[in-house]
Amino acid sequence: MTEFLDTCYNAIKLQTTAIPDTIRNVKRSDITVLKDKRLIFIGCGDSYAVAEYGKRAFLAVSGCAISLSPTELHNIPLNEQSVVVGITASGRSLATIAAMEYAQENEATTIALTDNEKGTACDYANEIWETKSGVNTYNTSPLAPTTAAMAYLLKLAVIKQSMPHTHIHNDVHILENEMASIVTWAESAGKEITQILKSDDLLYLISDGPNYVASQLGMMKFDEYSLVKGMSVLREEFQHHYNISIRGGEPAILVADSPPKEKDEIYMNILSDTLKMRAYLLHCPDYLQLESSLGQSIANTITLQMAAFHFTLKHDPGKDKFKLPHAEAFKIY
């Protein structure tokens, strides 16, 4: 294994401690600034998927939330009733920083959800929500900071809900105390997924609800290693449009809520039998005791991280970097 792949793997394994440490770092007072405000989550890449997750978490507890790419913030009115949460693990995303500066200029309250309290984004934040990933570099795939940010937002949703013994309340407890079991399962399931994949595949990651965030992040992980091309697709959109262009033998992962329902089995049969795809049903096992799709999507995200890593380890063990000329083509940091 190269130093690069070793760093990537360690960042995945860090989630065993990053998620519990982050959940314990959330303060009940963090929710105060959101009271009676319009909540807008922004971010780029992995952080945009986290913004989508934040929107879904707060909508689940009757919050008012939207998610946007940072450059889209200019298309909506902002005022003192707006709260803009800029999500950036490293605190250096130029688009997010510019959007937070714009938000402050228009009297919105700004919050940086970040793993790096010394990042530039914090200079444009009225408040800082800090994750505790434990990583020592942000120059590889952002793995532990991403799910840590998701866990931070899920804990805030639980605080906003103020109701014990709900599904998301249970899941925060499981994420805080049982991450070793979750990561162990995720690695095993991730290795299973690699068995349906071939180099240069076009991989469809199909889902909806909070698990659609897992499919988005899985797509990004496969794309970053450049051996498999990922495509994240909503379930309904796949059956309305994307299925038309399928060639026999292409792989698909259906990321589903747990326990799977009859509709999931029907969907899988169509993928395998009608469309002749190499299909895999990804869902959390019952023994993990994750009850909500918000909690399950974090575990499923880690599984897809593991799948992308182990496929790369098997087919390109000498890989020592991402496609740097491509990554640097646009100045994003």
Image (tube, grey):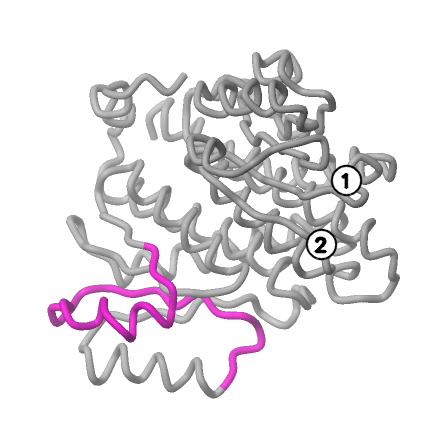
Which mark, by number, is residue 63?
2
As rendered, which of 185 and 26 lies closer to the eye? Answer: 26
As rendered, which of 75 and 98 lies closer to the eye? Answer: 75
Occupied quadrant, residue 13: top right
118 drawn magenta: no
As rendered, which of 161 and 183 lies closer to the eye? Answer: 161
Query: Mark 2 and mark 1: span between their CA atoms?
Result: 10 Å
Residue under the image location 29 percent in, 37 percent down: 225
Q: Residue 164 at what x, y percent from top left? A: 88, 62
Which mark, by number, is residue 103?
none
165 in relation to 260, above or below: above
On the image, numbered disc 1 is attached to which residue?
34
Residue under the image location 41 percent in, 25 percent down: 140
> In the visual, does 333 lie left or right of 165?
left
Q: Residue 152 at what x, y percent from top left? A: 69, 41
Q: SS for tag 2?
A: loop
* Quadrant of image for the N terminus: top left
327 in relation to 26, above or below: above
Q: How many marks?
A: 2
> In the visual, does 213 lie left or right of 149?
left
Which span is picked out in magenta? 232-261
Neighbor class of circle 2 (other Cα within 10 Å; few <14, some 14-19, many 20+) is many
Residue type beneath disc 2: Gly
Q: SS for tag 1?
A: helix
Q: Are marks 2 and 1 in contact (CB under 8 Å)?
A: yes
248 drawn magenta: yes
Residue under the image location 36 percent in, 24 percent down: 4
